[in-house]
Image (cartoon, helix red, strand yellow):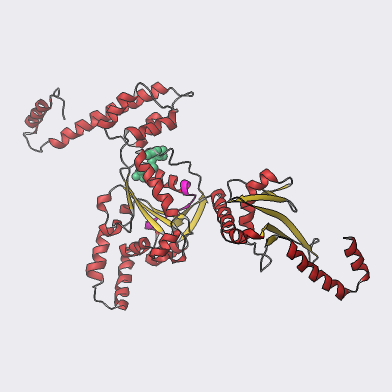
Amino acid sequence: MFVWAIIQQYFPHNIRNFLDKHSQKLLTLFYPYIQITFNEFTGERFKRSEAYSAIETYLATTSAVQARRLKADVVKNTTQPLALSMDDHEEVSDDFNGVKVYWASGKNVHKSQSVSLYPNTDQEKRYYRLTFHKRHRSLVIGDYLNHVLKEGKEIKIKNRLRKLYTNNGSQWSHVVFEHPASFRTLAMDPVKKQEIIDDLTTFTKSEEFYNRIGRAWKRGYLLYGPPGTGKSTMIAAMANFLNYDIYDLELTAVKDNTELRRLLIETSSKSIIVIEDIDCSMDLTSHRKKDKKEEIPPLLPPAAATAAESEASKTSKVTLSGLLNFVDGLWSACGGDRIIVFTTNHVEKLDPALIRRGRMDKHIELSYCGFEAFRVLVRNYLYLEDHDLFGSIYRLLAETRMTPADVAENLMPKTSPADVEGCLRGLIGALEKLKEEESRKTVEKDFPAPATEKSDEMKEEKVIENGSNGKVL
Ligand SMILES: Nc1ncnc2c1ncn2[C@@H]1O[C@H](COP(=O)(O)OP(=O)(O)OP(=O)(O)O)[C@@H](O)[C@H]1O
Ligand SMILES: [Mg+2]
């Protein structure tokens, strides 16, 4: 420092430059560390570098533990509104496969030359500087930096507030998505549930696989089952599990295929696109027949075929072929993973073309409440693992068809603290009532009342057959 001060004072400018340049070179010969700088703003002044912000997120946890001076910032649209990061000129270390690296934060202040309306025109340019030993060069530049950027982005996605989009005609509008459902609270057979969780996890990690086999990175799920069996709840659980946004597409509000395509192109990656009650959204079967057999003969030239199709879409809004294109993912050339979910109460009404494998990759039936599903509900609602009354409930659930929604309703505590036994007895009562109703309905179905004068006689016969006490069936 002393020598350098003397040089600065007594040597002319060009000699100083010469010494400066060569001393740097000399230093690098003996200094075994490599440094990489990541500036906050790259290129244009106003574009914040993605790498910088990923590093900032990645280092947040380490900084909270290691740094002595931290900065706190309020961030919008995240689940953790107060973000901590290390203050300027702090340093933290990180370990990766046994290799130690150092991250330092710093800032350069540039005096602004231009005249500005704002009082403080100095530009602060922040940066992160990574320092590591040169023998780990390839590991750090390759694997480590990839790991940092990927992890940083993932944490960001995890922390952001998720959104629920709905289409009001041709426009998406959104609210914050805050549904508390999770796979833990979803009542269904545990084996089936685990299968779905595994399927989702595999899908989200398969970007490279989908690229290699040349398929759009998307997966279709068809959820079917009677009302109140948890189809909508499962979609919310999926979104919470994956940290995806939900696009709830109201097909009846979409004017035509063009509008459908536009809405879909506007969806972001890492999202679940949902069409609820697909059988009610459009008359799928008839449109397909019309499209295929009458409107567009197979040998029609393309222009004529398009004209015929547009003629069809005028009357039919969104056509099945439009919907099939959507499911096939032609529109998703913009990349990113998307999950498509259709729900229906009547799987038998759907056109086979729509639900064939490859379009809807997984068909999931959500059905009446079994004992395993009941155990999940009773754990959620009453914090109960076991009870003497479980035996009767097990038997009654096997004999009846009660939806999880109804079971849940009966388990809802009516007092505080909850009267556990009262709730279970209430459920048993409801199950017994349902059982009676179901057996009465079965009898009615097997022996329908004839609309003739003889009906009274017939009724008596049936009563005798079923050992009932002569009440009207
Ligand atoms: N499998 C389940 N696990 C946990 N809760 C459930 C389940 N099924 C239903 N419920 C409860 O019942 C309510 C209704 O369920 P949900 O809306 O998911 O049914 P659905 O199958 O979508 O019915 P619909 O066909 O009428 O749309 C939910 O708010 C939830 O509390
Ligand atoms: Mg629903």
Q: Is residue 203 magenta?
A: no
Picture layout, residue 453 above or below residue 238: above
Q: Quadrant of the N terminus?
A: bottom right
> Residue 148 appears at what percent x and percent y?
59, 55
Q: Residue furthest right?
A: 10
Does 244 lie within the magenta span? yes
Q: Is residue 310 left or right of residue 245?
A: left
Residue visible at 86% across and 74% down? Answer: 15
- The foreground one among 439 and 461 is 439
Residue 266 in the image: state x and y as whole percent. Answer: 47, 62
**Quick one: 449 or 65, which is closer to the camera?**
65
Up/down of 12 relative to 102, above or below: below
Taking depth in this image into account, of 158 and 133 the one nearest to the observer is 133
Residue 40 in view of the camera: no
Up-down: is 411 above or below 346? above
User: Which quarter of the image is occupied by the C terminus?
Assistant: top left
Q: Position of residue 11 (x, y in %)?
A: 91, 72
Picture coordinates of residue 276, whole percent (x, y): 37, 51
Which portion, as a residue range, is magenta? 240-252
Instruction: Pick the residue in front: 337 or 311.
Output: 337
Task: Name the image quarter holding residue 204.
Answer: bottom left
Looking at the image, residue 137 sits to the left or right of residue 436; the answer is: right
Q: Is residue 355 left or right of residue 383?
A: left
Farthest residue toward the front? 30
Image quadrant where residue 36 sits: bottom right
User: Could you tell me which residue is drawn at 81 percent across and 65 percent down?
Assistant: 111
